[in-house]
Amino acid sequence: MSNRGAIGFGGFLLGLGLGYLLFRELNLTLNSAAWILIILGSAIVLSAVIRAVSPGLGLHRIVGGLAGGLIFALFLTQGISFFTGIIGVNNGFLPYLTSDVKTYTGASTGDSVYLRLGSMNGEITVTTWNQQEYRIVSTITARGTTQKEADDNLANLGKDLVNVDAASQQSLTLVYNSPILINNPYQINVEVKLPANAKLDLDLTTSNGIVTVSNVNGGSVTIHTSNGALRLNNVKADTLSGSTSNGPITGTFDATNCDLETSNGPLTIQIPSTMSGTYSFQTSNGNADVTVGSTTEYRFDASTSNGDVTFSVPNFIYSRDTRTSKAGQTVGYDTAQTKISVAVQTSNGSVTVRRNVSGV
């Protein structure tokens, strides 16, 4: 490698290391375009100054390498969804807006409801109430480079609720799609209320927004978002799965089978332990804190690549016990009628698992 190449490569490694240490502690999604411009602009200015002061030495190459390393560190720590923030609705390149509120209501006479909901650049909130009907409220904001373009974008969205009543299950489908991939002009927040006495199957998808599910007794509950938190409050399900990026996962829930995953976000979870279940939790660049109930028996397996694993579980027998990785089960696990298995994995974070002696 030539001296000039070594200078540039050294600058790249320097930028990658510094950027990783800095950016892994931050969530920069809302200001993604500004950060990219700051890095590139600073690199151009510094490179020009160094080249003018010391022509022929090639020292300006270290600045270009440094900028490349910083941007690559952004990708590693913030994920691909970080860069989608540059072309999303909140990037400031669409200054004109118009909005509309659509409300959908109807009777729910059956004891089972399936809801498929697809939104974009906004929050989804699903909860139950003591009424035998559903209520869905969508607040839609459309943007444009002109007011006419914003109005046209709102008119072109044109999606209505599809309601199919069947003897076994009522099916509700509301999916918003945009043909505009670059500079997506829509922000859609959706609030849903469903009958509390119905068994609910949920399939919820959004981007750049929080998803909150509360007081739900579900069969299959599936949730996907990016750049937003998953909040699960008093949820019970046969199958519970969810994923996000750049956001935490929090809540209290029971499930027969559960798989939750985030990146660049912590996990703060309580399992009341009212039924047997298998749980898998994964994150990166975040701590994991799991509290379970006191009335059943458990098997735990937890590991991290850069942090501590701590179990606070009475009557626990370890099959693996190191600083970064622990596994084992409580004394009565093999013969218990109700048993729960929990696997937790993170990187660049600590894992804490505790059994709450007073109950969750």
Image: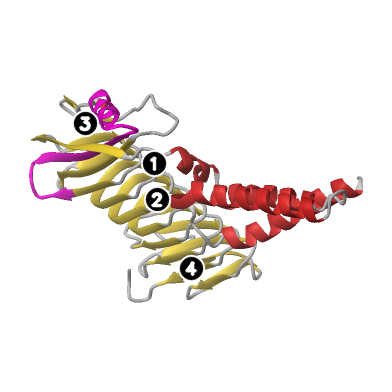
Callout 4: helix, strand or loop? strand
Mark 1–mark 3 Cα distance, whole angstroms, equals: 20 Å
- Compared to residue 47, the image places residue 168 above or below, namely above
Start-end of magenta stretch: 128-156
Measured as percent of width and height from the top left, residue 27 is found at: 48, 56
Q: Which residue in the protein does label 4 denote? A: 353
Q: Is residue 26 left or right of residue 134?
A: right
Q: Which mark is residue 207?
A: 1
Q: Please report the residue visible at 52 percent of the width from the left and 71 percent of the height from the top.
A: 311
Q: Which residue in the protein does label 3 denote? A: 172
Label 1 CA crowd tier, 10 Å (few <14, some 14–19, many 20+): many
Label 2 CA crowd tier, 10 Å (few <14, some 14–19, many 20+): many
Measured as percent of width and height from the top left, residue 6 is found at: 86, 50
Mark 3–mark 4 Cα distance, whole angstroms, equals: 38 Å
Instruction: Write down the quadrant of residue 175 in the picture.
Output: top left
Q: State if disc 2 and disc 1 touch (CB < 8 Å).
A: yes
